[in-house]
Amino acid sequence: MVGPECFPDNPAALARQNDGFIAFDAANSYLLPASTTFVAGGAVAVYHTNLSLGIAYSGDEFFHETFVSAQASKCLFRTLLAGVRIKYHSLFQGDSYGKSHGASADAGLIWEISDKTAFGIFLCNPFSVSFSSDKSLSGIACVASGVCFHTGPHSLVIAEIEKMPTRPVNIKAGMEWDFSGNFVFRCGAQYATRMISFGCGFVLNNIRINIAVSNSLIPGSQFTFSSLYEFAKR
């Protein structure tokens, strides 16, 4: 499953991305401008390593967050993919609380067991460093693992289990159907947040567009849009 960022949660997922691209994402909850997140990024392949950079901004003038991430993904062996991501996080909480900022890192592995099955593990924020002398800023640590299985030439199933400190285990599941090579339908669910999602994707030459609608207890209704332009020749 993917989050609101322009890159998959597991940084190893881009290891087989041989062509450069630029991407733009937007996500909104409750249809409120202050709860909108914008993401822009890009990637390029250099010496069999995919290097990518992304920036995300959410909030308004009174409360906002900014993320900047740099990522490297590579095929270590024929069936083993790896990736690492370094993130800078800035949080502004108004004049009363001021600004805090820090850095953290993610790491991931994907083992392609066969042509139809892959297993992945993802470590999010295993450690963080605060750059503010008076405030501590650290992301929520998370460990996740999942399996992707191609049920047919045009369909796949994904199952994930995720654990954060002091929070219940979250189970995720999703399916994808590719109807024509240019149109994809997706659906998914999460247990901890009682989230249900539906979405679709379109391919127009070198442009990919994805839209999704989700509903959950927290944060309620959410709308997501993402676009990607790939520099490959079609």
Image (cartoon, grey):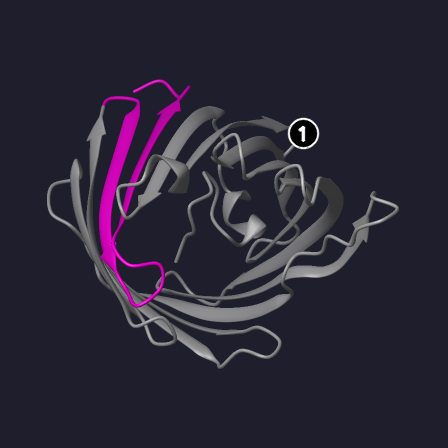
Asked whether, in this view, residue 112 is left or right of residue 158, the answer is: right
Identify the residue at horizontal 16%, vertical 35% (top origin): 182
Whether 141 is drawn above or below 170: the answer is above
The residue beneath circle 1 is 47
- Where residue 49 appears, as percent x and y from the top left, is 64, 36
Residue 10 % position (x, y): 54, 54
In the image, taking residue 70 as reference, residue 37 lies left or right, namely left
User: Residue 203's quadrant in the figure?
Assistant: top left
Please state the extent of the stretch shown in magenta in the rendering: 205-234
- Residue 207: x and y in percent read 29, 24
Q: Main secondary structure of the magenta part?
A: strand
Inspect the magenta stretch and tell me whether residue 56 lies in it.
no
In the image: residue 228, left or right of residue 215: right
33 over 166 or under it: above or below = above
Farthest right residue in view: 133
Between 81 and 170, the one lying in front of the other is: 170
Rendered view: 104 above or below 32? below
The amino acid on which the numbered mark 1 sits, given as a three-letter code, is Tyr
